[in-house]
Image (cartoon, grey):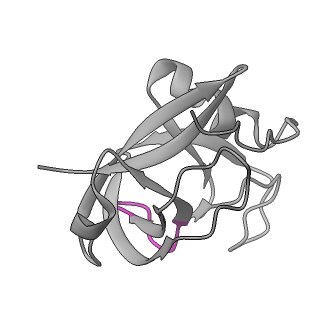
Amino acid sequence: MAPPRPKPKLDQENTPFWTGGAEGKLNIIKCGDCGEYTHPPRVLCRHCQSENVAPEAVAGTGVIDTMTVNHQPWAKDLPVPYVIARVALDGVPGVYLTTNIVNSPVEEVKFGDAVRVTFEENDGIFYPLFEKVG
């Protein structure tokens, strides 16, 4: 059993991201003016500075852009090795999530692998993790 993940402090900007998994949704902030996405969540669009932003459910698929395999047991009950990856989200240009790749042996995870979101719930927070497709 792995130790719990650090719990984010929820606020008006990030709550849809951290709780969307309850409905199976990966919510990313989208600007209603320029149509661009912003992550991490902010009250202003990072592209045009508009305040007309709102969470939008995205496909939750992507590809592993870069990754590393961690072998260091940073916490007492943290099983190693595990994959830390940056996932480029499909249909969400310029947005990457740093996450873990789960449900696959670490030696089978490669750059460019197609992945899809899955959620790990802990105390009302739904952590977006990714697993290989196929």
Q: Nearer the viewer, residue 105 or 40?
A: 105
Vertical comparison of 33 with 130: above or below: below
Quarter of the image for residue 108 reads bottom left
Horizontal and vertical percent position of residue 102: 39, 48
Q: Is the magenta region chiefly helix, strand or loop?
A: loop
Total numbered circles: 0
Looking at the image, residue 108 sits to the left or right of residue 60; the answer is: left
Q: Is residue 101 above or below residue 77?
A: below
Tell me where residue 109 sits by quadrant.
Answer: bottom left
Residue 20 shows in this picture: yes
Compare residues 6 and 50 and report the one nearer the observer: 6
User: Between 48 and 110, which is closer to the camera in this rendering?
Assistant: 110
**Screen quadrant of the N terminus:** top right
Q: Is residue 52 left or right of residue 81?
A: right
Residue 35: tell me if it is visible. no
Residue 41 to residue 96: above or below? above
Q: Residue at x 49, y 19 (%)?
A: 23
**Residue occupying the far front of the picture:** 76
Q: Residue at x 35, y 60 (%)?
A: 91
Residue 75 in the figure: left or right of residue 98? right
Q: Whole-percent x and y of residue 130?
A: 40, 49
Comparing 64 with 56, the one in front is: 64
Instruction: Tell me if 12 is positioned left or right of 117 in this view.
Output: right
Residue at image coords 51%, 58%: 80
Q: Which residues are magenta?
A: 89-96
Where is residue 2 drawn, in percent x and y? 60, 39
Q: Which x, y percent locates residue 129?
A: 48, 46
Tell which residue pokes out farthest to the left in this image. 134
Specify whether residue 133 is painted magenta: no
